[in-house]
Amino acid sequence: MDDVVTVTEPAEPDVAAIVALWERCGLTRPWNDPIEDIRLARTTGHGAVLIASVGERLAGAVMVGHDGHRGAVYYLGVDPGARRHGIGRRLVEAAEAWVLARGIPKINLLVRKENAAVLAFYEALGWHDTHTVCLYRTLDPAKRDDEMRQKAAWAAALPRRDP
Ligand SMILES: CC(C)(COP(=O)(O)OP(=O)(O)OC[C@H]1O[C@@H](n2cnc3c(N)ncnc32)[C@H](O)[C@@H]1OP(=O)(O)O)[C@@H](O)C(=O)NCCC(=O)NCCS
């Protein structure tokens, strides 16, 4: 890839293009609304969306934020045709810089244990497994019920694997 890669926090992100990219990367789930996630990140003052462009073309995007103690990375995705050219690394480094610039010295993210490729990617960037368990709870009761229904339907639609 010869074109210059730029990483920016766009003033008016192209939300539709970013969501389409995340869909191509398999990062969206029916029970999460990425448009609302982008809006929340950008309006609470605790987060941002960063995009990587190759020339005029959107090649990758990531969401970064912090809770006042630790930073967090979400929705890191590089277009399938643009992988292994350092764009994921550039996006993670930009997310780390965004967090550090706000006086937050540490950063976390979630990766499924079975996702060996993404674990290898983060290990190559100097991140390490904390061997902790992530506990989770959806606080909005209406959203909780809807999420449980959607997760069950999504799991039922997955191709069955041999044990
Ligand atoms: C993970 C992802 C963002 C990596 O983006 P990328 O632009 O291809 O990564 P980079 O080119 O910056 O890779 C940097 C280094 O990470 C390692 N790495 C990257 N992808 C890897 C893979 N699939 N397997 C093993 N190591 C990998 C390599 O050491 C690589 O350096 P090298 O290419 O010189 O060997 C991309 O594969 C992706 O979008 N995956 C699907 C979405 C996803 O699962 N996101 C993470 C959610 S937790």
Image (spheres, rainbow, N blue to C red):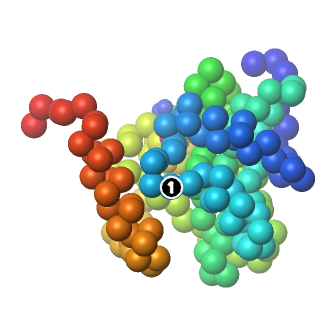
Q: Quadrant of residue 43?
A: bottom right
CA neighbours of label 1 inside 10 A, class few (<14), some (14 to 19), many (20+): few
Picture coordinates of residue 119, whole percent (x, y): 45, 46
Name the secondary structure under disc 1. Answer: loop
Q: Quadrant of ligand 1?
A: top right
Horizontal relation, residue 66 to residue 155: left or right:
right
- The single residue placed furthest to the left in the displayed view is 163
Q: Quadrant of residue 98?
A: bottom right
Which residue is label 1 attached to?
A: 32
Q: Quadrant of the N terminus?
A: top right
Q: Quadrant of the C terminus?
A: top left
Q: Residue at left 52%, top 60%?
A: 109
Horizontal relation, residue 149 to residue 64: left or right:
left
Horizontal relation, residue 161 to residue 86: left or right:
left
Q: Residue at left 28%, top 36%?
A: 158
Depicted 141 relative to depicted 22: above or below: below
- The single residue placed furthest to the bottom in the displayed view is 68
Amino acid type indicated by mark 1: Asn
Picture coordinates of residue 18, whole percent (x, y): 70, 41
Say if residue 20 shows up in the picture: yes
Say if residue 96 shows up in the picture: no
